Image: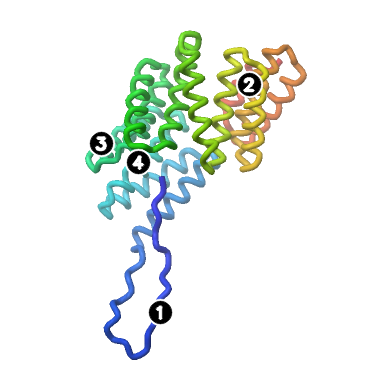
Amino acid sequence: MGLLFVLGLVVIVLAGCTSNPPPAAGPSVLRQRAVRETKDGHQAFRDGKWESAAHRFERAAELYDVLDDPAAQAAALHNQGQSLRQARNPEAAHLLFEQALTMNMVIGQPADQANNLAGLAQCHAMAEEHEQAIELLEQALELATKAGDATVKAVIENDLGLTLLQSDPVASRERILQLLESALVVHQQNENSRHLATAHLNLGRALVVFEDWEIAEEHLHHALEQFRAIDNVRGLALAHEAVGHLYLQLGQKEEARRAFRSARRKFAYLQDEEGLRRIDAVMP
């Protein structure tokens, strides 16, 4: 979610005219600082520097609080929560999502409420509390649907599909595929390449679990192409890892090793210890 700010004004001066209103003021110094902290936070998040991103978003939230801008403050708190969740601190992230959710409810932002419910669900999923996570995601999906925000709805469909995949893939197979395919269709219509790449990746992962090898491979290669196009190293690492698991299941050990090695190099670049442990545990 983004906020648009007026960064400059073009003033036309009419000689001899004294009745023109004065030019509108640009954003204040405080707001410019908040915008800069938010921008730097997003960059740190893209670079996988979770603690740095959390610090930037925290600063932005403090500044928006001073400016009495609850919508922007709630967005910054949500982003801080996502950063801390990625940093494997779900307890701190949970508190931030709850705080942002309360603010969304007060000012009437159902789509953002849905995003923060999804954030809470992700924290529960990290603790393998899948039942609580699914309940929260179902609430979030209902809110996003009522709000009419197709992108938020698709992101939540993706999260719910993955959580069901972790919880009970056999019993939920039809629902999982319906959710992930629905999310993919929405992202194909939008221009967000990262969301589209992630949708292909997650549908491919699910199809590996369901042993639909050919279609799984097709989606995973689409994910690789999309992540390459936007230079998303983390996405490439995860996609190569998924391809490795696909080839491992097919008994193609050399192809699996090649994919896992590629994933490992990227996780090493990102200093992602958890990713490295996962690769080392399955490398044939």
Q: Residues within 10 Å of mark 1 (few under 14, many from 20)?
A: few
Marks 3 and 4 sit apart, C-alpha to C-alpha, by: 11 Å
Disc number placed over residue 174 in the picture, else none: none
Q: Quadrant of residue 145?
A: top left
> Which residue is disc 4 drawn over?
77
Question: Nearest the camera: 226 or 78?
Answer: 226
Q: Which coloring applies here?
A: rainbow
For residue 123, side relative to residue 70 (left or right): right
Q: Residues within 10 Å of mark 3 (few under 14, many from 20)?
A: some
Q: Are marks 4 and 1 in contact (CB under 8 Å)?
A: no
Instruction: Indicate which disc, 3 or 4, sits on the residue closer to the N terminus.
Output: 4
Instruction: Indicate which disc, 1 or 3, sits on the residue closer to the N terminus.
Output: 1
Report the number of discs: 4
Residue drawn at point x = 77 percent, y = 19 percent? 254
Q: Quadrant of residue 222?
A: top right
Question: Nearest the camera: 22 or 151?
Answer: 151
> Which residue is disc 1 drawn over?
12
Q: Residues within 10 Å of mark 4 (few under 14, many from 20)?
A: many
Q: Quadrant of residue 248?
A: top right
Disc number placed over residue 102 in the picture, else none: 3
Residue drawn at point x = 46 percent, y = 43 percent? 53
In the displayed orientation, state which residue is furthest to the left. 106
